[in-house]
Image (spheres, grey):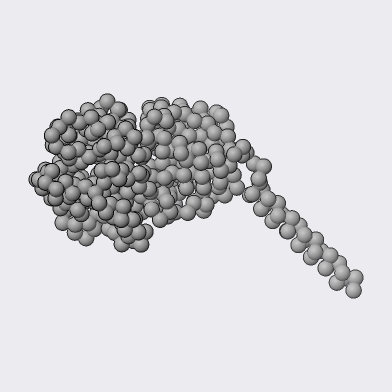
């Protein structure tokens, strides 16, 4: 009897110790008293739609977590100054740092390797899963090609209305695109946009001009003005300022001009010409990543998205991509229903955007071509866009 009692006591003690350790671990992982500092590095400020789009997520973090999260911000940071800005956040004892421009990726990953105690999350980049691997370095981006495609459908619907009403001829169905750089992210976006337009107006063509900068208001405005003067009816953009929208609103030409924006609604600055915008909603990822660090959990296990190693993406279905403020004053009849239908089709996996009787050529390697008859799946293996071929005969890149 004594032997049994002794064994029973030992078993009970072991169980109690194990339960205590489990409880302690769980308590530590969900420590509601933990406070962290979160840093953001921006290439612009609140006046730039691209940066303001991230600031929405920053404000959501403050609203959701309150005093548990202290925030540090570095604005108007060039790619050359990115490392210095990140080092300032490191010196301020940040536990988590969000870097928000493609050109910051190299610096962010380098510093992540030097500071394994800090989590780094880089937007719009594709180097999280490339060598050398860094466990505390993460990338993320919304599947924006889907938003670009629907924006193209909306623009095409308007273009079709202009043709049917006799305001323009079918031969005038030309699009102008103000593009930042010849990166895959930009090429993928303007290709998806054109393919959306051509779904409605099969004869539409596009002229693209690169500004080779993300955020130069005057240059973007002047580029849009040049495209308008060349006869473009639709002007869209992958650039960070409202310059193209202002150019459309102030255009002094005899043909109609319609603008399609990015990152934010531009109807306030172009009320008679800006039709719609699409944007990535950064809030779901950023708030989830902050929550993961607060709970001492892996970021990718806390994000509701498609996960590829240390990389995450999602589309309309997870609210990572959004259409922004359809301008009903100028939109063609039936546009709201069109948007709803195609978002629903994206959510059900019914759409392959990059497909059709097209041949694309890599602008840097003429031997790298693609035939789209079989289709190309964007964001299949990474969050950053990878479609990088310029479509022959329907897209012209101007110097």
Q: Position of residue 3 (x, y in %)?
A: 87, 71
Q: Is residue 86 visible in this depiction of the protein?
A: yes
Which image quadrant: the C terminus? top left
* Residue 361 seen in the figure: no
- Nearer to the camera, 153 or 22: 153
Residue at screen point 49% across, 38% down? 58
| Farthest bottom residue in view | 1
Residue, x 34% and y 35% (percent of image)?
A: 268
Q: Quadrant of residue 324?
A: top left
Answer with left or right where residue 174 lies relative to residue 262. Answer: left
Judge by depth and name the residue closer to the eye, 154 or 25. Answer: 154
Foreground of the two, 270 or 366: 270
In the image, what residue occupies the spot 47% across and 54% down?
A: 304
Q: Quadrant of residue 330?
A: top left
On screen, residue 316 above or below 47: below
Residue found at the far right of this picture? 2
**Residue 270: horizontal and vertical position, in percent?**
29, 34
């Amino acid at each position: 009897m004594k032997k049994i009692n002794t064994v029973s006591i030992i078993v009970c003690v072991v169980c109690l110790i194990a339960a205590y350790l489990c409880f302690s671990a769980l308590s530590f992982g969900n420590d509601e008293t933990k406070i962290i500092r979160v840093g953001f590095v921006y290439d612009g400020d609140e006046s730039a739609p691209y940066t303001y789009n991230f600031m929405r997520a920053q404000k959501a973090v403050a609203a959701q977590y309150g005093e548990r999260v202290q925030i540090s911000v570095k604005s108007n940071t060039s790619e050359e100054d990115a490392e210095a800005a990140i080092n300032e956040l490191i010196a301020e004892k940040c536990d988590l740092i969000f870097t928000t421009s493609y050109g910051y990726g190299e610096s962010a990953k380098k510093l992540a390797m030097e500071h394994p105690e800090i989590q780094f999350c880089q937007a719009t980049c594709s180097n999280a899963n490339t060598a050398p691997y860094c466990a505390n370095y993460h990338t993320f981006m919304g599947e924006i090609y889907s938003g670009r495609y629907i924006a193209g459908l909306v623009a095409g619907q308007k273009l079709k209305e202009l043709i049917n009403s006799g305001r323009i001829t079918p031969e005038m169905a030309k699009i102008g695109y103000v593009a930042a750089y010849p990166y895959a992210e930009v090429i993928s976006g303007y290709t998806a946009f054109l393919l959306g337009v051509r779904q409605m107006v099969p004869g539409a063509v596009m002229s693209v001009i690169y500004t080779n900068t993300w955020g130069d208001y005057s240059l973007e405005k002047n580029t849009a003005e040049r495209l308008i003067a060349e006869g473009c009816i639709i002007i869209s953009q992958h650039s960070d300022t409202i310059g193209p929208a202002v150019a459309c609103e102030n255009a002094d030409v005899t043909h109609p001009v319609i603008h399609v924006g990015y990152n934010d609604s531009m109807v306030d600055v172009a009320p008679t010409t800006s039709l719609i915008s699409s944007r990535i909603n950064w809030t779901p990822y950023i708030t989830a990543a902050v929550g993961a660090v607060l709970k001492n959990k892996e970021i990718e296990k806390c994000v509701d998205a498609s996960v590829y190693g240390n990389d995450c993406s999602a589309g309309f279905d997870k609210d990572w991509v959004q259409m922004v403020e359809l301008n009903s004053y100028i939109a063609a009849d039936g546009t709201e229903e069109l948007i709803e239908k195609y978002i629903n089709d994206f959510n059900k996996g019914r759409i392959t955007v990059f497909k059709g009787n097209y041949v694309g050529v890599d602008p840097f390697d003429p031997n790298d071509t693609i035939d789209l008859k079989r289709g190309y799946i964007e964001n299949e293996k990474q969050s950053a866009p990878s479609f990088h071929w310029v479509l022959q005969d329907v897209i012209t890149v101007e110097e």
